[in-house]
Each structure stands twice: as structure tokens, then as C-alpha cells.
């Protein structure tokens, strides 16, 4: 948590903007790591399917790109919603 010194009283208080940013960055980082994990699992499954079936690697990689694009869009949406929720928590708006 980031703390700033109040000039008038010499007290310390949490910087609301920095806390908001910190909350947002932590949640976004968790989501990003989960996305990377999912992409690695998808790659493993793709290799497994490709080795067992008679489909082309291009067919599978095209489908994976579609899934990754949709996942990135969802990730951006989650980041925006997280930021808005953290803002409501911090400021009560």
C-alpha cells in the first residue's frame, strides 16, 4: 500500500489513486497469468490433437487465434470492469 504524508497534520494516509492503481494492477496481473496458462494448455492440446487426427496445423492454429482474440477482448473488458469496481470501492461512486 502506498502512503503519503498529510502536509498539515504530519499524518500518513493511503493515497487513493495509488491504491486504486495497485488493486487494478494486481487483479489484471492475476488475469493475465491465467490467460498465459490457458494459452499454454491450449498449445499442448493442439499438439496432441494434431498428432492424433488428420487435420492440418493451419486449421488448428486459425481456430486458436480466434479463441485468443476473443480471450483478449474478454480480458480487456474484465480489466475495465475491475477498474470501475475498484473506483467505486475507493470513492463510493
Image (cartoon, rainbow, N blue to C red):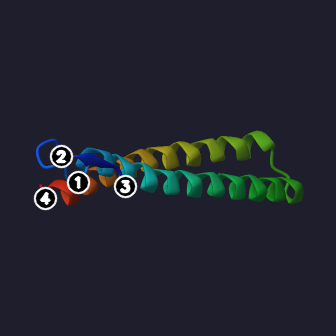
Residue 52 sits in quarter: bottom right
The residue to which callout 4 is attached is 92
Q: Is residue 80 visible?
A: no
Q: Which mark is residue 59?
A: none
Q: Is residue 66 visible?
A: yes
**Looking at this rendering, what residue extends furthest in the front direction?**
10
Q: Is residue 4 left or right of residue 23?
A: left
Circle 4/circle 1 CB separation < 8 Å: no
The residue to which callout 3 is attached is 1
Q: CA distance from mark 1 to mark 3?
A: 10 Å
Task: Count neighbours of disc 2 (C-alpha within 10 A) and say few if under 14, some if 14 to 19, many if 20 or more.
Answer: few
Q: Between residues 45 and 90, which one lies in front from this camera angle?
A: 90
Q: Earlier in the sequence, mark 1 or mark 3?
A: 3
Q: Between residues 88 and 74, which one lies in front from this camera angle?
A: 88
Task: Count neighbours of disc 4 (C-alpha within 10 A) and say few if under 14, some if 14 to 19, many if 20 or more.
Answer: few
Circle 1/circle 3 CB separation < 8 Å: no
Amino acid at each position: 500500500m502506498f502512503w503519503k504524508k498529510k502536509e498539515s497534520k504530519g499524518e500518513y494516509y493511503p493515497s487513493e489513486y495509488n491504491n486504486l492503481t495497485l488493486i487494478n494492477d494486481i487483479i489484471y496481473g492475476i488475469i493475465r497469468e491465467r490467460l498465459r496458462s490457458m494459452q499454454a494448455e491450449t498449445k499442448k492440446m493442439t499438439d496432441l490433437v494434431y498428432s492424433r487426427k488428420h487435420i492440418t496445423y493451419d486449421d488448428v492454429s486459425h481456430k486458436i487465434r480466434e479463441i485468443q482474440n476473443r480471450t483478449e477482448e474478454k480480458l480487456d473488458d474484465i480489466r475495465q470492469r475491475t477498474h470501475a469496481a475498484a473506483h467505486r470501492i475507493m470513492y463510493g461512486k
